[in-house]
Amino acid sequence: MSDQETQDTPLAQARQRLARLEELSERQAQAMRGNLRFWAIRWIVAFGVIAAVTLSTGQYFWLWWAGALVAGSTLAAMLGTKLALRRKTDSTRAEVARLETMLRAAEAEREADS
């Protein structure tokens, strides 16, 4: 088999896809740590501002609920993205393992026929 034919096989394509996904997953994990830090800092500041506004005016207590809703939504979105990427990586890893098993079985069958 030539190098081009080897790259065009379903197994080779799946391996390339898995390598790209794992690289993306690693970069996403690093970015997630930074995003979580910035998220925490942003909401510490935001809730500090909300506290200052509500304490100084005695009004606008709804800001607590609005801030909690937005903070929770943004956190859920970040974690949902991480979960989706992990699921995609896991399914691709399982696909590669299935293809490797099929390939080994076909090679063993071909050797047995020889």
Image (tube, rainbow, N blue to C red):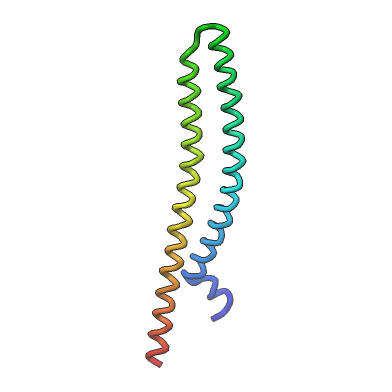
Residue drawn where x is 48% and y is 41% of the image: 79
Residue drawn where x is 42% and y is 89% of the image: 111
Identify the image quadrant of residue 90: bottom left
Relative vertical location of residue 60 with respect to residue 45 in this rendering, above or below: above
Relative vertical location of residue 42 with respect to residue 88 in this rendering, above or below: above
Residue drawn where x is 39% and y is 79% of the image: 105
Identify the image quadrant of residue 50: top right
Q: Quadrant of the N terminus?
A: bottom right
Relative vertical location of residue 86 with respect to residue 13 in this rendering, above or below: above
Place of residue 106 in the rendered image (x, y in percent of width and height, measured from the top left): 40, 80
How many tags in the picture? 0
Place of residue 31 in the rendered image (x, y in percent of width and height, measured from the top left): 60, 44
Place of residue 86 in the rendered image (x, y in percent of width and height, measured from the top left): 48, 52
Place of residue 56 in the rendered image (x, y in percent of width and height, measured from the top left): 57, 8
Residue drawn where x is 38% and y is 85% of the image: 109
Q: Quadrant of the C terminus?
A: bottom left
Relative vertical location of residue 97 with respect to residue 41 in this rendering, above or below: below
- Camera-side residue of 62 and 103: 62
In the picture, measured across the screen, residue 3 lies left or right of residue 65, that is right
